[in-house]
Image: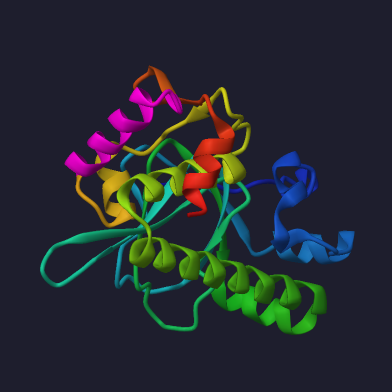
Amino acid sequence: MSTVFMPKHIHPIYFNNVFDECLLFQNLTPNELDRLEGSAELSKCNEGEYLFRQDAPADFVYNVISGTVAIERIFSNGKRQIIGFLFPGDVIGLIHSEKYDCAVRCLTKVEVYKFSRKRLNILSEEVDHLKQNMEQIKSRIFSRVMDHLYVLGQKKALERLCFLFMQLLERLPGARPDRVDLYMSRQDMADYLGSTIETVSRSLAKLKADKLVAFPKLNHLQILNLAAVSELAEC
């Protein structure tokens, strides 16, 4: 990971359109944004690198600027579970424990703002809107985790895959039914959906055979029947 220190007069945080929808920065005054920027560094990672590893000291909070990352947890038996995928505007690291309970792996080249967790927590006690934003982010993360647990426990393989596709369509910047870029591998999908790569492959083949989706290129998804895919995702 490389870190770039930005001159203060550039104000990279709140003059970047990526953050128009980022909850962390909402409702802050220019002065408050200046103070928040003072605790941020711009960092870059290459595909395959880790923002942080599981059980590393939880010293930083990260806001994704560009690229896609996977949140993953490795268990004592060596098995991996992907807990979620993060996209531009998403935040990770707002936790209370002293160590990260998961790892974050870059699926593409990634840029992030890296905040000192200690300084961010101190600032949140002084800036009410920042504190509220951080609590809302935690609430959203919890809701996504609950949705994921429901999918793993209640849905069939085909329905799980459609759930993932609808998530990507909703959350991936620039995604539209005729073009959803899949930055994760088939194995990543399987590890997120609590399945195997063979089951994911069979489910993809079924969706293609039923003309619900198409793949003009390996990682370029087209949703041909949005209503049907949405219905399967919500079963």
The quarter of the displayed image where residue 124 is located? bottom right
Q: Residue sitting at 53 percent across and 45 percent down? A: 231
- In the rendering, at what x and y percent does residue 170 appear? 61, 44
Residue 198 on the magenta segment: yes
- In the rendering, at what x and y percent does residue 224 appear? 52, 24
- In the rendering, at what x and y percent does residue 44 appear? 48, 43
Look at the image and name its color scheme: rainbow
Look at the picture and state if 183 lies above or below 54.
above
Q: Residue furthest left?
A: 77
Q: Is 190 or 110 nearer to us in this picture? A: 190
**Total number of numbered labels?**
0
Q: Residue sitting at 34 percent across and 22 percent down? A: 218
- In the rendering, at what x and y percent does residue 106 appear? 39, 45
198 sits to left or right of 100: left
Q: Residue sitting at 40 percent across and 68 percent down? A: 149
Look at the picture and state if 178 lies above or below 94.
above
36 sits to left or right of 152: right
Overall secondary structure of the magenta section: helix
The quarter of the displayed image where residue 26 is located? bottom right
Residue 221 on the magenta segment: no
Q: Which residues are magenta?
A: 197-213
The reply to whether residue 3 is visible in this rendering is: no
Look at the picture and state if 190 lies above or below 75.
above
Q: Is 232 or 7 nearer to us in this picture? A: 232
The reply to whether residue 104 is visible in this rendering is: yes
Q: Is 70 or 7 nearer to us in this picture? A: 70
Q: Residue sitting at 75 percent across and 40 percent down? A: 17
